[in-house]
Image: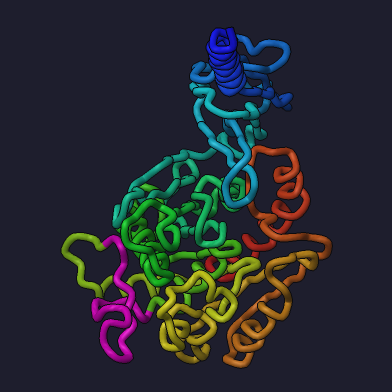
């Protein structure tokens, strides 16, 4: 009898365990989908989301968006928890997007005023190089009918380890106002193995990517309506460092290797135009960059050495630090426009001020503005309401200040 009870108990426990696993599986196979209320437009989701928002895993949703009169689509998007900044956004810039539900997510669409985009030809995802797993791309914002306009090149931030060129599209649209600039927003490799590369990417290689993008843009300048000999470059946070590096370190472009021989630190652009020598590319980039606006970024490797190769020493630090190579204005003029927020928790005035002082000591023109009440990354554009509100409050007016500074040099 006891043996029979024992067998029945085992059967019961087995059935209970299977039922529990099935229940857990059912729970795991449904994810919460939240729809964000749109402004200045509308969107539909098919199939329709249930009232409780729970959608079976693997469901393919089709999202279609349409702007209100006087507005244009910015992006259809979904966001989920995860990534360097706590949440990650995946965006699509056409009127329809397919999304496969495989996690809890929020879905929405954003719209911008027609005046920001109606006179622009936007070319997305131009691949300029593929030195690793990730294709390196840029987006071009060309005023319609553009011809021989100066370029404004933007390098995004994200700790040298996140984001791409899309996050700068708000700033790109602001700099394109008035049809005076062809604006290009570029991407680059992330440090270490964050792109999935077998070999870790080092800081100097990110700088080489920026030089490669510039060389590619110059080669195709006529297609975009731009003048390859007139370039303004800007970037925020990590992009602040990279844009300052492009402006200050371009005379170090060369094919002698980076630290492979004693005292030789030369940047080989990740893209080289056919038939051009590295000496020619050095000259063209160095002479073309007329002005730089590195926003709330570090300029000395001492301020970002945690992102450097473990074996890096002082020579390497200096070679990737704009602060170590500020030229005298008599040799080369590089006007600087620099902003940081007074409430920035990442980049303090103590980080920026020594670079500003060194620029002034060398006779360089520099305008340094501390934006009262602003935090970090106010030039970023993401679909969430808070980031867009921050951009409207701080990004828009100081983009206008930046553009005015560029005008003073290039017009």
Q: Is residue 28 left or right of residue 284?
A: right
Vertical placement of 317 versus 195: above or below?
below
- Seen from the viewer's position, the closer of residues 115 and 297 is 297
Which sits in the foreground, 393 or 69? 393
Q: Is residue 150 above or below residue 97?
A: below
Residue 77, horizontal then vertical, whole percent: 58, 31
Q: Is residue 84 left or right of residue 210?
A: right
Magenta region: 251-271
* Dominant secondary-structure state across the stretch colored magenta: loop
Q: Residue furthest front?
A: 1
Q: Position of residue 325 (x, y in %)?
A: 48, 86
Question: Which residue is drawn at the image coordinates 52% and 72% (left, top)?
Answer: 244
Residue 291 vertical position relative to residue 392 in the rendered view, above or below: below
Q: How is the rendered protein coloured?
A: rainbow
The answer to which quarter of the image holds residue 346 is bottom right
Q: Which is nearer the eye, 410 or 130?
A: 130
Q: Residue furthest left?
A: 275
Q: Is residue 408 visible?
A: yes
In the rendered image, residue 89, in percent from the top left (x then y), is placed at: 58, 39
Q: Is residue 390 left or right of residue 272?
A: right
Pinpoint residue 46: horizontal percent, then vertical percent. 56, 11
Residue drawn at (79%, 68%), measured in percent from left and top? Answer: 342
- Is residue 15 something one can see in this rendering? no
Is residue 332 magenta-colored? Answer: no
Q: Nearer the viewer, residue 185 or 387?
A: 387
């Amino acid at each position: 009898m006891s043996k029979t009870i024992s067998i029945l108990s085992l059967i019961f426990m087995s059935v209970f365990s299977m039922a529990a696993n099935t229940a857990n599986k059912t729970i795991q196979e449904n994810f919460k989908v939240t729809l964000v209320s749109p402004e200045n437009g509308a969107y539909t989701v098919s199939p329709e989301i249930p009232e409780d928002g729970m959608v079976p895993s693997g469901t393919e949703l089709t999202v279609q968006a349409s702007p209100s009169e006087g507005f244009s689509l910015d992006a259809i998007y979904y966001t989920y928890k995860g990534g360097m900044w706590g949440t990650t956004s995946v965006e699509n810039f056409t009127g329809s997007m397919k999304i496969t539900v495989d996690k809890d997510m929020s879905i929405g669409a954003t719209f911008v005023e027609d005046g920001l985009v109606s006179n622009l030809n936007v070319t997305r995802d131009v691949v300029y190089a593929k030195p690793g797993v990730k294709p390196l791309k840029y987006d071009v914002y060309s005023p319609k009918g553009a011809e021989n306009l100066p370029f404004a090149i933007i390098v995004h931030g994200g700790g040298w380890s996140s984001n791409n060129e899309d996050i700068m599209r708000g700033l790109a649209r602001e700099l394109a106002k008035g049809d005076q600039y062809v604006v290009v927003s570029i991407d680059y490799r992330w440090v270490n193995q964050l792109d999935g590369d077998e070999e870790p990417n080092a800081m100097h290689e990110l700088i080489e990517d920026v030089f490669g993008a510039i060389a590619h843009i110059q080669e195709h300048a006529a297609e975009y309506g731009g003048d390859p000999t007139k370039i303004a470059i800007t970037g925020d946070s990590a992009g602040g460092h990279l844009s300052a590096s492009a402006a200050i370190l371009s005379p170090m472009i060369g094919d002698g290797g980076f630290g492979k021989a004693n005292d030789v630190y030369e940047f080989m652009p990740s893209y080289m135009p056919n038939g051009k020598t590295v000496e020619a590319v050095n000259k063209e980039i160095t002479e073309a960059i007329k002005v730089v606006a590195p926003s709330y970024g570090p300029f000395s490797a001492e301020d970002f050495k945690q992102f450097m190769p473990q074996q890096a020493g002082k020579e390497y630090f200096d070679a990737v630090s704009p602060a170590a190579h500020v030229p005298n204005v008599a040799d080369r003029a590089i006007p600087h426009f620099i902003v940081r927020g007074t409430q920035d928790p990442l980049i303090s005035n103590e980080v920026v001020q020594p670079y500003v002082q060194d620029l002034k000591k060398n006779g360089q023109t520099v305008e340094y503005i501390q934006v009262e009440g602003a935090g970090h990354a106010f030039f970023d554009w993401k679909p969430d309401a808070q980031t867009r509100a921050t951009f409207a409050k701080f990004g828009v007016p100081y983009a206008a200040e930046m553009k005015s500074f560029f005008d003073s040099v290039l017009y």
